[in-house]
Image (tube, coloured by chain):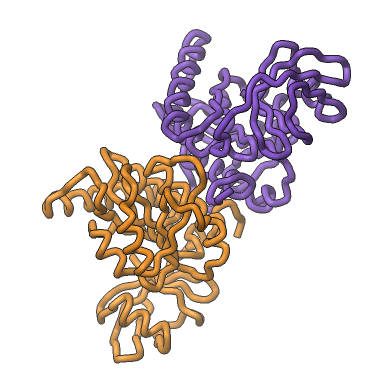
Chain colours: A orange, B purple
């Protein structure tokens, strides 16, 4: 479930205007009846439902506060993972939940070895969601991260345009993750990690054209699942709540 | 293999004096014929052999430079992992090598479920070393990390006294990893991670008395193997070369 950070305090009825409303309407494409997790400026968390939309406002109704929300990170991180071999995705989903990810988006890119037909795509998504649900209980989180439907890299590049987006690229030798992350000023991050075979240069270009920053994780070659966990750990450490007391 | 950081440039014959010599002689207990990996002040790496020791000097002979050493981190991190269940140690060893650890020390603590007799201890160590050796090739490192012999927590606490040492303790609510790490000034780190059942309070006290800092990794409950990878990632990110270009 996506989270919406608002610049005011929570109340029964919330009217979103201005840039926030535009984001909701045109980037996140919200519609009446949709339910969101809202984080207010004091980091209080609640679920809210969209009541109505105009061309520049969104009206929300608060459904319930989420108690003990302090196990949730103060930022939203989406892990976009190109399909790895074997059962590695299960592992990545489990660790992503523990480390505080908001959602996992499985992505099909050129060098992915596994191929699923439509029926299998849905079955996998459901299986991964189940693993996420189990991990939530184990690690004491209050918000259930979602495993989204499998998308193509092209599709992903068009979405999440209001996030600070990074593509971990093993051939990147100019931009370090640390530098890029420290200069980013956002509460919403997306990290894209390749499959075992890495990204094709055109795929990296596609993402860059869409607004992603291509970054290096350092000099050692990391396996897909290691890169995924390390990248999430780094974002949560630098911008979130990992390694801290809040 | 332990690494020795020296404050001069490498040469054929190296004489270590002063505090460095004392560390070598009394903390690391070096003896003639021992072989070390040396990192000089320009981060050049070489193997060297101990030729002779007096009460305050150590004489080394350079054996060979290690080429392409830029896949090695500029710091030394030891992962001390209390024995987890099942085959999780294999996983931890593999990821620790990829992420740049210098060595892994398997530790027996009170809440470890697995028990090995002496014969099995050696067999496990050899198996884990093999996994480390395979991971080295895959990730392009030049220095082979060692999997040390299994030790008791009591033994571990007496060793590595010249390292900045941290014990990841889920009940710690005063000292954050970030704060402790940022204020640490060392090239040598040891992180101690508990088994599934965590540490007994007396074990944490024992480590604190020995000079460890007890730290919190944040509010979510991490599985043993997740804590291990995340802690190593954090040290390598904050103090080493993960997420950077050098």
Relative to residue B132, is residue B220 depicted above or below?
Answer: below
Q: Residue at x 28, y 52 (%)?
A: A129
Residue closer to the observer: A48 or B80: B80
Horizontal placement of A94 versus B139: left or right? left
Q: Residue at x 61, y 37 (%)?
A: B191
Residue B21 percent across, percent down from the top left:
82, 25
What quarter of the picture does the C terminus of chain A occupy?
bottom right
Q: Residue at x 17, y 47 (%)?
A: A115
Residue B22 percent across, percent down from the top left:
83, 25
Q: Where on the picture, by quarter, is residue B148?
A: top right
Residue closer to the observer: B118 or B97: B97
Horizontal placement of B166 versus A30: left or right? right
Q: Residue at x 57, y 62 (%)?
A: A182
Residue B2 in view (yes/no):
no
Residue closer to the observer: B114 or A63: B114
Horizontal placement of B236 versus A216: left or right? right
Q: Where on the picture, by quarter, is residue A102?
A: bottom left
Horizontal placement of B205 versus B79: left or right? right
Relative to residue A64, is residue A198 depicted above or below?
Answer: above
How many numbered circles are shown? 0
Relative to residue B23, is residue B73 depicted above or below?
Answer: below
What quarter of the picture does the N terminus of chain A occupy?
bottom left
Residue A76 in view (yes/no):
yes
Residue B196 percent across, percent down from the top left:
48, 34
Residue A74 percent across, percent down from the top left:
51, 64
Residue closer to the observer: B244 or A187: B244
């Amino acid at each position: 479930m996506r989270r919406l950070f608002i610049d005011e305090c929570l109340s029964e009825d919330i009217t979103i205007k201005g840039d926030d409303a535009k984001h909701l309407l045109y980037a996140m494409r919200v519609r009446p009846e949709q339910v969101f997790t809202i984080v207010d400026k004091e980091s209080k968390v609640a679920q809210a439902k969209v009541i109505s939309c105009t061309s520049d406002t969104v009206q929300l109704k608060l459904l319930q506060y989420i108690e003990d929300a302090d196990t949730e990170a103060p930022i939203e991180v989406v892990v976009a993972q190109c399909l790895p071999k074997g059962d590695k995705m299960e592992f990545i989903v489990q660790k992503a939940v523990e480390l505080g990810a908001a959602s996992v988006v499985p992505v099909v890119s050129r060098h992915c070895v596994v191929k699923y037909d439509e029926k299998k795509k849905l079955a996998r998504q459901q299986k991964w969601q189940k693993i996420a649900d189990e991990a939530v209980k184990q690690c004491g989180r209050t918000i259930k991260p979602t495993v989204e439907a499998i998308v193509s890299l092209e599709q992903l590049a068009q979405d999440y345009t209001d996030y600070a987006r990074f593509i971990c690229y093993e051939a990147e030798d100019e931009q370090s993750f640390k530098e890029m992350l420290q200069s980013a000023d956002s509460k919403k991050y997306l990290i894209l990690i390749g499959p075992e075979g890495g990204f094709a240069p055109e795929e990296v270009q596609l993402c860059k054209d869409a607004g992603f920053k291509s970054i290096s994780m350092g000099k050692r070659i990391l396996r897909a699942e290691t890169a995924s966990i390390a990248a999430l750990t780094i974002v949560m450490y630098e911008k979130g709540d990992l390694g801290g007391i809040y």
